[in-house]
Image (spheres, rainbow, N blue to C red):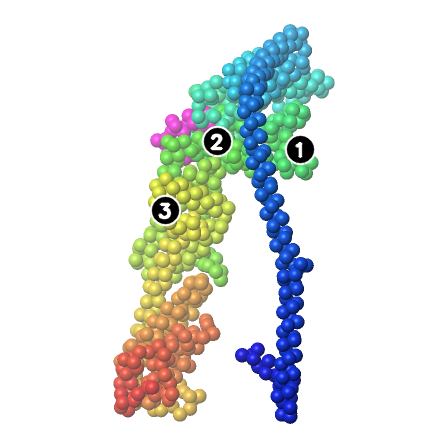
């Protein structure tokens, strides 16, 4: 339509509004348009169909490319036929060459095989010759060459050769270790090891002995087996699963620990007076004193040897992180000191593990002795980690406690003593004393004592290595939380007498549990618990549940249970307050609402004495509640009270009495000027909490043009019937 309009405008402009010679001018204009049409047509034909047109060039290029593709396909087919013919003609030659290549490869492998045997034999002869000639460095270098050959050949398919090389290495390892150990033990006797660092010594002689010590220690480190840089301390430990992680120490440390082991078992086994199972702190403190006294010796005598040989402890994430950090900071020697100290500790811990395993297994039926050994063991482990920076993922004496039979006894003992302690807390006469009042919580004595009990338990089991053991203690903690809750709310007499204190106790515990849930210790347990749930779900192929995946803390169930009990107690508290309010409202309910005088000026309004008693009672209880419970609980409580009081006035006063105009005005003013100000201290819009009562009062007052929102038509009709001026004939539109 717009194109036609444009055309008409163009024609009108061309012809104008003069009708003289209109037909002639139209004929001329028609010829002009025909000429323009022919010109346009010629231009189109010349550009599209002409010899120099773009379309013609494009068609020509398409034809050329098609011919090129056809030619290329022909060439490919020709090459295929030539290749097939060439392959057929050279099949015999290729077969011959394939056999020659396989034969060459076989002979090369045999040559390598025999070269390895020759190398092993040559290096073995060198070791033997060098040992006989007392050329220790050359012997050790030949042994290390065998170890390097073993590492290279370890991935080869020739298993018999690899086994032979390993046997040869083991053979020379035993010989070299025994050879150097004899001289090393002589040096230890000459320095009177284990000497105390305060003993007077001849410095010149001691320096010579120190050089010999370091030379032999370096040789002992170099002759260790290539597959494992550490050896077993004794043969018995190889058969013990408990001692499996405590055998990974170097040969020099092994030799240094031997006299400590002899002293330990001399004093703390058998019928010696120092062997007191009820005094585990005696042998544990002795181990700590040895660690403290000989740290300096380890650093001074063995530190340079470890630095020379780039000695590192067993694979450990903590060690790797420490290595990166200390090397970056330029403190590699300090890192070696930590490695030495930790390796020395591991050697000493083996004696402790054997002793603890024996004592705990023997005294399982004696609760006092058993629990004392456990306490001292945990304190010992804490000191190792805090004072001597012993890594968490290193072998630990707590592995004795986590054996199935020991752990079962331990956790049952924890449960037993926790329940006894919990009963003592609840029987304390000052259990409900409020210790701390804060805007977020009120801490009672029993809540503080109980959380201290749980926190102490967390500190005790936090040092365990396996998460599955920690989860069992976590289950014990959640059981204790539920039992504690049941005990304090189960006694009805106590619950009513100390209702606000119990509310504060439950709320404070819930508040602390939520904060604990953000602790790294409990977050790691939550993560492990989720992984365990996923694994169990995968195995059982059960339906997918997102309970754990949406959990925020490991205490979610306990927090939910505590919050539910808090809500129930809040309702009870509100009911108690409303009972007192209703008792004070007896006269207010009997006021003569039907004969009250009308209110002409609301500024001169005054509440009745009976109404003042009820509202003051309610205000007094509300203020007392506000001061005695945390603000978060109070913010839950006062809306409940507002709703309950509103319902009480609506049902027991408004619907239970007859009202004239003055009585209706008095009730509305009571609600507006007495009830609303009570709640205005806690919210900017108090009317939304009693909107149903306000609407009922306004309906009762026959306010013009008022339309109730929350009231139903039946309720409006019932309210209108409360007016004695024939209010039942009044309709609210």
Q: Nearer the viewer, mark 3 or mark 1?
A: 1
Give the Cα separation between the discs numbered 3 and 1: 48 Å
Question: Which segment did they paint magenta?
Answer: 352-372
Q: Is residue 145 above or below residue 460?
A: above
Task: From the image, tell me which residue sits under label 3.
Answer: 479
Q: Residue at x 63, y 58 (%)?
A: 55
Give the Cα separation between the discs numbered 2 and 3: 28 Å
Disc number placed over residue 332 in the picture, else none: 1
Q: Residues within 10 Å of mark 2 (few under 14, many from 20)?
A: many
Q: Residue at x 63, y 84 (%)?
A: 27
Q: Nearer the viewer, mark 1 or mark 2?
A: 1
Closer to the camera in the image, 474 or 123: 123
Q: Residue at x 63, y 66 (%)?
A: 44
Q: Is residue 508 above or below residue 616?
A: above
Hey, which quadrant is residue 641 in on the image? bottom left
* Magenta residue check for 356: yes
Q: Say what secondary structure mark 1 lies in.
A: helix
**Can you give x and y, in whole percent of width and height, for residue 26 in the image?**
62, 85
Give the Cα separation between the discs numbered 1 and 2: 28 Å
**Can you give x and y, in whole percent of width and height, for residue 360 in the image?**
41, 29
Q: Earlier in the sequence, mark 3 or mark 1?
A: 1
Task: From the image, tell me which residue sits under label 2.
Answer: 397
* Magenta residue check for 248: no
Q: Is residue 694 left or right of residue 318?
A: left
């Amino acid at each position: 339509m717009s194109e036609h309009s444009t055309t008409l405008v163009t024609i009108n402009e061309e012809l104008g509004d003069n009708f003289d010679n209109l037909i002639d001018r139209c004929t001329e204009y028609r010829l002009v348009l025909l000429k323009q049409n022919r010109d346009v047509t010629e231009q189109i034909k010349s550009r599209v169909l002409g010899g120099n047109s773009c379309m013609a060039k494009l068609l020509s290029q398409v034809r050329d490319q098609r011919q090129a593709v056809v030619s290329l396909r022909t060439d490919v087919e020709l090459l295929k036929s030539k290749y097939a013919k060439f392959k057929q003609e050279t099949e015999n030659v290729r077969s011959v060459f394939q056999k020659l290549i396989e034969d060459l490869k076989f002979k090369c492998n045999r040559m390598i095989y025999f070269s390895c045997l020759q190398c092993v034999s040559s290096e073995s002869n060198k070791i033997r010759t060098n040992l006989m000639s007392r050329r220790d460095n050359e012997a050790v270098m030949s042994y290390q060459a065998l170890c390097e050959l073993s590492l290279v050949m370890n991935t080869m398919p020739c298993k018999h050769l690899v086994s032979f090389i390993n046997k040869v290495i083991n053979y020379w390892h035993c010989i070299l270790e025994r050879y150097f150990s004899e001289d090393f033990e002589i040096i230890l006797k000459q320095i009177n090891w284990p000497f105390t660092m305060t003993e007077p010594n001849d410095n010149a002689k001691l320096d010579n002995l120190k050089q010999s010590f370091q030379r032999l220690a370096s040789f002992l480190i170099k002759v260790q087996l290539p597959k494992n840089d550490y050896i077993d301390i004794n043969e018995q430990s190889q058969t013990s699963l408990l001692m499996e992680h405590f055998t990974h120490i170097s040969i020099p440390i092994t030799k240094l620990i031997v006299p400590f082991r002899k002293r330990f078992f001399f004093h703390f086994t058998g019928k010696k007076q120092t062997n007191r199972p009820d005094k585990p702190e005696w042998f544990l403190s002795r181990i700590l004193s040895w660690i403290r006294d000989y740290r300096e010796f380890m650093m001074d005598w063995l530190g340079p040897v470890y630095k020379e040989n780039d000695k590192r402890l067993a694979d450990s994430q903590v060690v790797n992180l420490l290595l990166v950090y200390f090397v970056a900071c330029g403190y590699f020697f300090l890192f070696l000191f930590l490695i030495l100290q930790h390796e020395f500790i591991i050697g000493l811990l083996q004696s402790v593990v054997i002793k603890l395993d024996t004592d705990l297994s023997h005294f399982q039926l004696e609760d006092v002795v058993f629990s004392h050994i456990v306490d001292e063991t945990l304190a010992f482990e804490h000191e190792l980690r805090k004072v001597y920076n012993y890594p968490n993922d290193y072998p630990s004496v707590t592995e004795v406690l986590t054996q199935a039979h020991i752990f079962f006894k331990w956790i049952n003992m924890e449960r037993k003593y926790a329940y006894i302690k919990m009963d003592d807390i609840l029987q304390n006469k000052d259990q409900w004393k409020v210790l701390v009042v804060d805007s977020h919580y009120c801490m009672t004595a029993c809540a503080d004592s109980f959380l201290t009990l749980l926190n102490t338990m967390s500190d005790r089991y936090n040092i365990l290595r396996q998460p599955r053991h920690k989860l069992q203690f976590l289950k014990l903690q959640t059981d204790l939380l539920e039992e504690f809750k049941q005990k304090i709310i189960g006694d009805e007499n106590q619950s009513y007498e100390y209702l606000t204190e119990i509310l504060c106790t439950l709320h404070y515990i819930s508040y602390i549990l939520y904060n604990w849930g953000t602790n790294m210790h409990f977050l790691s347990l939550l993560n492990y618990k989720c992984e365990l749930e996923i694994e169990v779900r995968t195995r059982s192929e059960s339906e997918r549940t997102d309970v754990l995946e949406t959990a925020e803390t490991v205490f979610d169930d306990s927090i939910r249970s505590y919050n539910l009990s808090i809500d129930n107690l809040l309702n009870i508290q509100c009911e108690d307050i409303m009972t007192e309010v209703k008792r004070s409202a007896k006269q207010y309910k009997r006021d003569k609402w039907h004969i009250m005088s009308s209110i002409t000026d609301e500024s001169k309004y005054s509440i009745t004495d009976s109404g003042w008693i009820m509202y003051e009672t309610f205000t007094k209880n509300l203020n007392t509640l506000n001061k005695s419970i945390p603000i978060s609980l109070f913010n839950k409580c006062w809306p409940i009270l507002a709703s309950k009081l509103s319902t009480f006035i609506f049902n027991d006063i408004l619907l239970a009495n007859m009202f004239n105009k003055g009585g209706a005005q008095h009730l509305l003013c009571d609600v507006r000027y007495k009830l609303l100000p009570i709640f205005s201290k806690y919210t900017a819009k108090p009317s939304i909490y009693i909107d149903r009562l306000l609407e009922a009062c306004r309906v009762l007052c026959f306010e013009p043009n008022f339309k109730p929102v929350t009231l139903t038509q039946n309720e409006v009709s019932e309210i209108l019937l409360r007016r004695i001026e024939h209010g039942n004939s009044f309709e609210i539109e």
